[in-house]
Image (cartoon, rainbow, N blue to C red):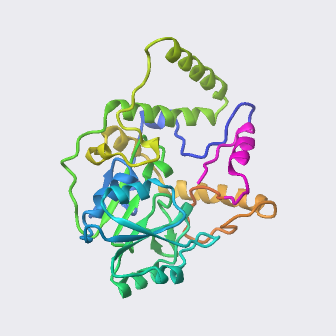
């Protein structure tokens, strides 16, 4: 790594790809090829609209994992459901024995998260849900392009959601897959300022992974100075990074620019590079740090290399000093 460059945690893009995208490989891949799938503003809006297709009793209880990002919990609560948490093992597996202990007549659905691209035992979970009359919701926000052997993650549940922008370098984009088609034509376009700011963030991350990183940091310092000394500022009408559900997001659709940025995406190359990077890191860190997933099963498209550490904030600080981005979950 050259001096001043950063190792990114989120997807980056070549500006030249935005100018001359080509190819439509993505449309032939799961979930984008599914007839009952559709793009959404974000993964959390996919949750909100997808819940309406499940015919769950209003005010019923959804079983959710005790380990989660938070925004999915906010969205479920905003949709009018009660929640009951179940245990997740140290290697992030669903504890079906603990789920069984928490069952009662108020339960309507089981919410399953495929953490960092690694599959939960979806056949066992599907059988469990069928046995107890529960809808199965697959959260694939961190698991786009991942499979459990030959089975795509998101293809087994009664509903599945994806956060496309976490895997692909797009401004803001989610994906909803349901058993029946659910047209969302009534939604209004994403505010231009939101798409602009999020696109700039993608480009900033991309530049910081190149020798031009010092120039980008200098430009951002100048922008902050101008913001403090003048009335200049960029206002985001909808901020995807708020980390929580906002009711106004339910009315937002997909921007044409986000669709455009998908063009030219090659899933095969993305999967191959992510698997290669994961193996590279896991091989070197497995004896030094605690990894929930030390090996990489066939079919998995990993989003991050997760680490179990005692002091997350301190580890993040020390990595940042060395130009390594990371995310606190």
Question: Percent position (x, y) of residue 154?
Answer: 41, 68
Q: Is residue 143 left or right of residue 61?
A: right
The N terminus, quarter of image: top right
Residue found 42% across the figure and 57% down from its top: 72
Residue found 65% across the figure and 43% down from its top: 325
Residue 197, picture quadrant: top left
Asked if one can make out residue 27 in the rendered structure from this viewpoint, the answer is no
Q: Is residue 147 left or right of residue 246?
A: right
Residue 181, picture quadrant: bottom left
Residue found 66% across the figure and 42% down from its top: 7
Question: Percent position (x, y) of residue 251?
Answer: 26, 45
Residue 172 part of the magenta-drawn span: no
111 w.r.t. 268: above or below: below
128 w.r.t. 273: above or below: below
Bounds of the magenta span? Answer: 307-329
Question: Percent position (x, y) of residue 5?
Answer: 69, 34
State the residue lying farthest toward the left: 186
Give 98 or 91, whichever is nearer the viewer.
Answer: 98
Asked if one can make out residue 169 in the rendered structure from this viewpoint, the answer is yes
Residue found 31% across the figure and 46% down from its top: 247
The C terminus, quarter of image: bottom right
Question: Percent position (x, y) of residue 133?
Answer: 33, 83
- Give the mark count: 0
Q: Is residue 170 left or right of residue 224?
A: left
Give 80 or 191, whichever is nearer the viewer.
Answer: 80
């Amino acid at each position: 790594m050259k001096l001043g460059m950063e190792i990114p945690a989120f997807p980056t893009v070549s500006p030249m790809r935005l100018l001359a995208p080509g190819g439509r490989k993505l449309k032939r891949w799961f979930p984008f090829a599914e007839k009952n799938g559709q793009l959404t503003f974000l993964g959390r809006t996919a949750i909100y609209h997808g819940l309406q297709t499940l015919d769950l009793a209003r005010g019923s209880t959804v079983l959710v994992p005790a380990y989660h990002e938070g925004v999915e919990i906010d969205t479920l609560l905003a949709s009018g459901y009660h929640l009951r948490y179940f245990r997740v093992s140290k290697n992030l597996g669903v504890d079906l024995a603990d789920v069984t202990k928490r069952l009662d007549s108020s339960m309507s659905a089981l919410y399953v998260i495929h953490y960092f691209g690694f599959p939960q035992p979806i056949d066992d979970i599907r059988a469990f849900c069928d046995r107890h009359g529960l809808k199965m919701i697959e959260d694939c926000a961190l698991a786009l392009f991942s499979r459990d052997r030959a089975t795509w993650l998101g293809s087994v549940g009664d509903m599945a959601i994806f956060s496309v922008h976490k895997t692909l370098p797009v401004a803001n984009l989610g994906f909803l897959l349901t058993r029946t088609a659910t047209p969302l034509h009534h939604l209004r376009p994403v505010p231009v300022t939101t798409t602009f700011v999020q696109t700039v963030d993608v480009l900033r991350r991309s530049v910081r992974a190149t020798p031009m990183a010092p120039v980008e940091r200098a430009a951002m310092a100048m922008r902050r100075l101008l913001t403090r000394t003048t009335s200049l500022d960029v206002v985001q009408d909808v901020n995807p990074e708020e980390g929580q559900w906002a009711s106004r997001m339910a009315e937002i659709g997909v921007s044409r620019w986000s669709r455009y940025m998908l063009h030219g995406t090659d899933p095969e190359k993305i999967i191959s590079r992510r698997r290669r990077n994961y193996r590279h890191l896991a091989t070197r860190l497995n004896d030094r740090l605690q990894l929930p997933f030390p090996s990489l099963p066939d079919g998995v498209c990993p989003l991050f290399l997760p680490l179990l550490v005692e002091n997350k904030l301190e580890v993040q600080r020390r990595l940042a000093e060395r130009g390594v981005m990371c995310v606190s979950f």
